[in-house]
Image: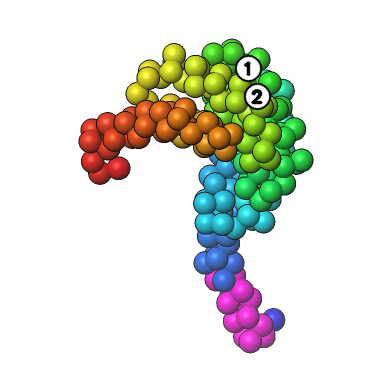
Amino acid sequence: MTSRDRRAVTAWLLWILAFCPVLAVVQPKTWEDYIAAGKSAYQQGRYTEAEKLFEAALKEAEGFGPQDPRLATSLNNLALLYRDQGKYAEAEPLCKRALVIREQALGPDHVDVATSLNNLAGLYSAQGEYAEAEPLFKRALAIQEKALGLEHPDVAATMENYAALLSKTKREAEAAQVEANARRIRAMHSVQNPLR
């Protein structure tokens, strides 16, 4: 081997040592990594990347068993991404499957069930299927109010979604009342946590 070849090999090894550890850290390895990277991409509007990461998380979660809550989380994340892109037909079965998993694994009154109900209701509402959405919003609110209390921020978020549905169905007085309750909860929490 000539000195030129040795320098080339040395340079190549130094490059590998310098950059491969960084590449290994950047590439998701676990379900948690895929979820975190997917959420980051989603929040930054990089939907194609988020979809790949959420699909990888879903594939990983399928190995955890059919009742594992991580599977439901993976399904929900992918469904929300599809919903935001207007891919309602792809989102609906994922939302429904996540709901079934959570109900069976966690019980019908768990707050994660309420999250799944709210997501499915939001999907139906986005499609103008208000009759399907309303009972889901109501059930989600009932679960959240019982589990979290009447003044929890998650209750306010679901109220806001429900108020939007009421407004879309021309029930402005009801919508105003629900929205006022949500604003009251939000205001209470902003006073308690002014840095939020």
- How is this picture coloured? rainbow
Q: Position of residue 40 (x, y in %)?
A: 52, 51
Residue located 53% across and 60% down the image: 22
* Magenta segment boundaries in residue numbering: 2-14
Q: For the residue labelled by badge 2, is the local secondary structure a helix, a strand or a loop? A: helix
Residue located 25% across and 44% down the image: 195
**In this image, 141 relative to 98: left or right?**
left
Indicate the amino acid at tag 2: Leu
Q: Position of residue 48 (x, y in %)?
A: 67, 56
Please tell me how crowded label 1 is: few (under 14), some (14-19), or many (20+) other residues with Cα within 10 Å: some
Q: How many marks?
A: 2
Q: Would you say residue 139 is visible in this rendering?
A: yes
Q: Position of residue 25 (x, y in %)?
A: 54, 53
Q: Is 8 within the magenta?
A: yes
Q: Give the vertical position of 57 relative to 47 (above or below).
A: above
Quadrant in which residue 12 is drawn? bottom right
Q: What residue is shown with label 2?
A: 99
Label 1 to label 2: alpha-carbon separation? 6 Å
Principal SS element in the magenta part? helix
Residue located 55% across and 65% down the image: 19
Q: What residue is shown with label 1?
A: 103
Residue located 68% across and 34% down the image: 129
Q: Locate the N terminus and report the quarter of the image it occupies.
A: bottom right
Q: Give the vertical position of 42 relative to 98 (above or below).
A: below
Q: Position of residue 188 (x, y in %)?
A: 27, 31
Residue sitting nearer the eye, 119 or 169:
169
Please tell me how crowded label 2 is: few (under 14), some (14-19), or many (20+) other residues with Cα within 10 Å: many
Q: Give the vertical position of 22 relative to 172 (above or below).
A: below
Q: For the residue labelled by badge 1, is the local secondary structure a helix, a strand or a loop? A: helix
